[in-house]
Image: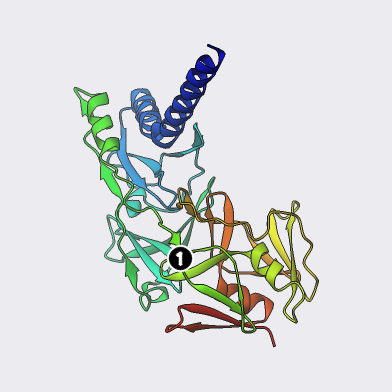
Amino acid sequence: MKKILSAVITVVMICTMCTANTFAAESWREAFVTRLMKIMSSDPSYNEVVLTDLDRNGIPEAFVMRDGLDGGISAGFTMNGNTISNIEVPGNIIGRCLTDITVYDKEGRYIFVGREVPRYSSVINYYKLMFDGQTLSTERILKEYVSAYPTIPYVDMYGNDFLTNGYPNRTKIKNFVDGYEGINTLTATNSNARLLVDGEDVEVSGYTVNDSNYYKIRDIAMVLRTSAARFDVAWDESLSAITISKGVKYTIVGGELSEDKGAALNVEQNSAPVYVDGEEKEVLSYNINGNTYFKIRDIGDMVGFAVDWDGDAQAVIIRTE
C-alpha cells in the first residue's frame, strides 16, 4: 500500500511540475492582457500597442502609445519569470518606429533598426534599437550604417483597435496578444561536428546556431588548459561581466566537459559584456539552457588560436601552435 501511495504521489508531483512549466512558458499572454487592460482603463487614449521580441527570447516586449500623439512611447513592459517588469523607454523617438523594424545580420550579431517617418517632414529617421532586459535605448543612425548587411525574417505586431464605446475590450486585447506566435525565437540544434585540437579528437558538446558552432567557453578553456593558447575564465561581480585572462592556466570549477545533448529549450542572446585582459570585446554569445555559449571562431580571435573547418570530415580544427 505504501508503494502504491508513493507512486501516486510521484505521478502527481510530475504532473504538477509539467503544469507549472507549461504555465511559466505561456503565462505571459494572460499577464499582458491584464496589464494592457489596466493601462487602457486608466486612460483610453493609450490604445496603440506594439509587441516585438528585441531580445529574441520568445517572450515579446510590449510598448504602448497614445492615439494620435506625435511623440514617444507611453509605457513598456515585458515578463521575467512569472513577473511583469516595466521597461524604461526613451523620449527621443516616435513610438511608431517600433512598428517598422528591420533586422540586419552583422556577422551573426543582429542589429534592430526602427524606421520613423515624422508627420511634418519628408526626412526618414533610422534608429538602432537596443534592449538590455530593463531599458530600451536608441541610437540615431544613417541607413548606410546597415545597408551593406543582409536582413533576416522578422515580424512585430501592431494594433490599435482595442476599445468598445470608449472602454478597453478584453476580448479584442486577448485576441491580439494570442495572435503573437513567437515566430522570432532563436533555435539551436545539437552540433554534430567533431572538434580536433592540434590533431587530437576531443569530446566537447556544442550547439549549432545560425549555421555556426557554439561551445561553452569553460569547456574550450578546459581542453586548452595545457596548450600554448591556454586561458582562464571568471565572472566579475563588480562588472557583471565574463573575464578572460590569456596565458593563464584554466582554474577548474567542476562540471566542465559534461555531455549536453538535450534539446535547446531556451535560447536567447546573452547581454553580459566580455573583457579580455581588461579590454572589453564586442562578441556575440547565447544563453542556451542556462549556459553561455560562444562561437568557436570568436573564442579563437579573443584568445589567440587558429580555427579552420574541414567540410569533408565535418570537423572544427583548432591549432594552438
Q: Is residue 13 above or below residue 262?
A: above
Going 59% across and 78% down the picture, which residue do you hit?
Answer: 196
Can residue 52 be seen in this snapshot?
yes
- Near mark 1 (Cα within 10 A), the count class, few <14, some 14-19 or many ≥20, is some
Foreground residue among 237 and 25: 25
Is residue 25 rendered to the left or right of residue 246? Answer: left
Q: Is residue 40 above or below residue 297?
A: above
Mark 1 sits on what residue? 208
Can residue 169 be seen in this snapshot?
no
Foreground residue among 218 and 255: 255
Going 48% across and 46% down the picture, which residue do you hit?
Answer: 89
Image quarter of residue 67: top left
Quadrant in which the C terminus appears? bottom right
Image spot of residue 303 (x, y percent) = 68, 76
Going 79% across and 62% down the picture, which residue do you hit?
Answer: 251
Is residue 311 rendered to the left or right of residue 152? Answer: right
